[in-house]
Image (spheres, grey):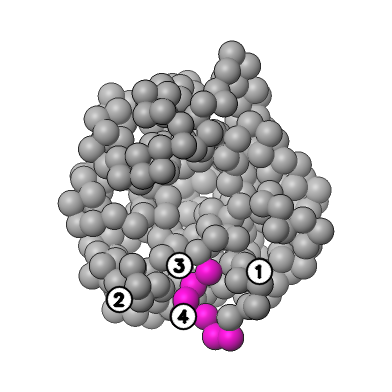
Amino acid sequence: MQLIDIGVNLTNPSFDERHQAVLERAYAAGVQQLVLTGTSVEGSEQALELCVKLDESGQRLFSTAGIHPHSASDWNGDSAQRLRGLLGESRVRAVGECGLDFNRDFSPRPQQEKVLEEHLALAVELKLPVFLHERDANQRLLDILKSYRDHLPAAVVHCFTGEQAALFSYLDLDLHIGITGWICDERRGTHLHPLVREIPRGRLMLESDAPYLLPRTLRPKPKNGRNEPAYLPQVLREVALHRNETMEDLAAHSTACARRFFGLPAVA
C-alpha cells in the first residue's frame, strides 16, 4: 500500500536536523512520495534544495513554488521572475502555495488577490497545476479562478476544511480536494465526515500539512506535538471510514490521483 503526501512543510524549522529521520519514518509507514510545500520565494528555493539533497534517485521528493497569502505583502518586482525560474526545475511540480486567507488577514485582501492572479498567470503560462489555500474566502476565490480555470491544467484546494456549499462549488469548477488531519479532530472536523463521501474518486488526495495538524486520533501522541508524514495513515483511516471504503482502496485511488495531478513517476 503506497501513499503520497501532497503537502508537507519540510522546510519548517521544527524539522531542522531531522529531515532524514522524518523521511525514513515516512517511507516505513508507506508514504512513498512527498510534495514539499513552498510558501515563500526563499522557502520554495529551500524546498527544492531539500528535494535534490535528500533524494538522489529523483523518484520520491518533489516540491511546489509560490507565496502563501499570509506573505502576499512580500511580493515585489523580482518575485515573478524568481518563481518562474523555480517552476522550470524538474522537481517543482505545481504553482503555490497561493490563494486567499480572509480569516487572519496577515496581508491586505487586495494584495492577496493581486498576488493570487500573478500565480494563476504563471500557471497558465507554464501549464502547471496550482496548489491553493483558502480560508473564509470561498466566493472571492471562485470569482478570481473562473477567469483562469479553462486555461489551467488542474488545481487543488489543499487542506479543505469548509462546508458543503464550498466543497460543491470547487467540485463544480473541476478542482481537486486535499484532506488533512483536520478530519481527525473531534472538536472542529466532524462536519467533514459526511462531506468526504461527496468527493469523486480521481479528485481526492491526502496530505499531512506537517508539522501542523497532528491527527488527534493518533495513539500514542508524540510528546513534541509535531505532525509528520509518517502519520498520514491516520488520515487515510479516517477518510476511508467515512467514505465506506477500505484503506487499501482509498490508498490506491488517492495515490493514483496525486500521481496524475503532479506528474509523479511510479515507485516500485
Mark pair 3, 2: CA separation: 14 Å
Q: Are marks 1 and 4 in contact (CB under 8 Å)?
A: no
The circle drawn on residue 26 is: 1
Check disc 4 and report the residue beneath it: 217
Toward which corner of the image does residue 142 lie, by quadrant? top left
Residue 10 point in image, percent of width and height: 66, 53
Range of magenta residues: 214-220
State the residue at coordinates (40%, 72%).
185
Disc with the residue nearer the chain's start (1 vs 3): 1
Location of the C terminus (image quadrant): bottom right
Helix or strand or loop: what does disc 1 sit on? helix
Check disc 3 and report the residue beneath it: 181
Q: Is residue 127 visible?
A: no
**Which label lies toward us, 4 or 2?**
4
**Which label lies toward us, 1 or 3?**
3
Magenta span has 264? no
Mark pair 1, 4: CA separation: 18 Å
Q: Assess disc 4: are there few (<14), some (14-19) or many (≥20) residues with their C-alpha within 10 Å of its C-alpha.
A: some
State the residue at coordinates (38%, 80%).
246
Disc with the residue nearer the chain's start (3 vs 2): 3
Residue 49 point in image, percent of width and height: 76, 42
For the stretch drawn in magenta, the main secondary structure is: loop
Q: Amino acid at mark 2?
A: His
Residue 215 point in image, percent of width and height: 49, 72
Q: Assess disc 1: are there few (<14), some (14-19) or many (≥20) residues with their C-alpha within 10 Å of its C-alpha.
A: many
Check disc 2 and report the residue beneath it: 242
Which of the two residues, 13 or 52, is positioned nearer the viewer here?
Answer: 13
Mark pair 2, 1: CA separation: 24 Å
